[in-house]
Image (cartoon, grey):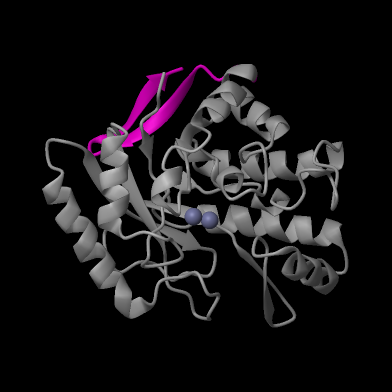
């Protein structure tokens, strides 16, 4: 079974390598049913990967033109990946992803996923890993419960540099209680929200398994949370990267269906 969709992609409008037209053509060649653009929304500070506020209109125009170009061949959706610090979009996007890439403390912001040096700085600022983990999952709940969020982006992004347990034990009960508590808090208010299984860190060489980690995926499956598959692709050669692996992870923890976003809304796909 091929999932043939991603709603998480980046282009040269933010930190991707290819233009929207190049990305759409690559997805079409793979036989994709639907392809969503989710440029990083502008931020009140310069993080380096975000779109400039003034470029967002051109981004939308480009994607809207592609919608027309691929009409009847592949569904194109216009989305946005919102950061915890992004302002509410002043445009009605087809869908919104909520992600936390930065944390704040003592008037400064720190990148969670940029590089190990920045990650180390963030841990120090929080006075240790435990506090940083608490802050990350608390920010994740708050950001996700904003208005109009459709998709929870890489819920355990904080494990990007931690596949070997260098920073914390991702199987430890105390850690998992924190993640499960965040999931419970989200599902209590938004039982219909869709959590993504994200293969982006695999294609970029940071991890060998997708987000979320297996124990977290297992918990989401147990709770009956809606799940989708996203490649978080930044280039034409990673549009469906490691989808087979991600599907195996799903099957191994008892996931029987995934959700795929189409023009008419989310549809169930048996796996
Ligand atoms: Zn992201
Ligand atoms: Zn992304």
Residue 145 seen anywhere in this rendered image of the structure: no
Total residue callouts: 0
Depth check: give the residue in front, 191 or 115.
115
In this rendering, would 164 be left or right of 8?
Answer: right
What residue is at 69 percent from the left and 51 percent from the top? Answer: 160
Magenta stretch: residue 262 in it? yes
Q: Percent position (x, y) of residue 96?
A: 39, 53
User: In this view of the protein, which residue sits in the foreground, 31 or 266?
Assistant: 31
The magenta segment: 253-271
Q: Is residue 134 above or below residue 90?
A: above
Residue 63, horizontal then vertical, whole percent: 23, 57
Q: Position of residue 217 (x, y in %)?
A: 64, 31
Determine whether, in the image, residue 211 is placed left or right of residue 64: right
Q: Nearer the viewer, residue 219 or 211?
A: 211
Query: Within the magenta stretch, is there residue 173?
Result: no
One can see residue 125 in this view: yes
- Residue drawn at 55 percent across, 41 percent down: 199
* Residue depicted at x 58% and y 58%: 142
Quadrant, the N terminus = top left
Q: Quadrant of residue 245?
A: top right
Question: Which residue is rendered at x = 84% and y = 53% of the image?
Answer: 167
87 shown above or below 225:
below
Question: Left or right: where does residue 156 sit relative to residue 21?
Answer: right
């Amino acid at each position: 079974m091929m999932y043939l969709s991603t709603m998480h992609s980046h282009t040269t409008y933010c930190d991707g390598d290819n233009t929207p037209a190049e990305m759409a053509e690559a997805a079409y060649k793979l036989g994709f049913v639907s392809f969503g653009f989710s440029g990083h929304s502008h931020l009140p500070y310069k993080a380096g990967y975000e779109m400039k506020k003034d470029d967002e209109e051109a981004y939308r125009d480009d994607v809207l033109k592609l919608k027309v170009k691929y009409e009847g061949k592949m569904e194109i959706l216009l989305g946005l990946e919102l950061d915890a610090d992004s302002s509410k979009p002043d445009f009605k996007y087809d869908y919104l992803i909520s992600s936390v890439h930065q944390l704040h403390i003592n008037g400064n912001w720190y990148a969670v996923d940029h590089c190990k040096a920045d990650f180390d700085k963030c841990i120090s600022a929080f006075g240790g890993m435990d506090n940083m983990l608490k802050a990350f999952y608390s920010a994740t709940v708050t950001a996700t419960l904003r208005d109009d969020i459709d998709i929870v982006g890489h819920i355990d992004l904080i494990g990007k540099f931690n596949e070997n347990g260098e920073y914390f034990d991702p199987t430890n009960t105390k850690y998992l209680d924190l993640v499960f508590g965040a999931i419970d808090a989200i599902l209590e208010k938004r039982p219909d929200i869709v959590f993504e299984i994200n293969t982006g860190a695999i294609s970029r060489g940071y991890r060998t398994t997708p987000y979320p980690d297996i124990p977290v995926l297992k918990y989401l499956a147990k709770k009956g949370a809606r799940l989708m598959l996203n490649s978080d692709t930044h280039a034409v050669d990673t549009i469906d990267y490691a989808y087979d692996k991600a599907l195996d992870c799903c099957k191994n923890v008892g996931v029987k269906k995934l959700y795929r976003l189409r023009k008419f809304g989310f549809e169930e796909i048996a796996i």
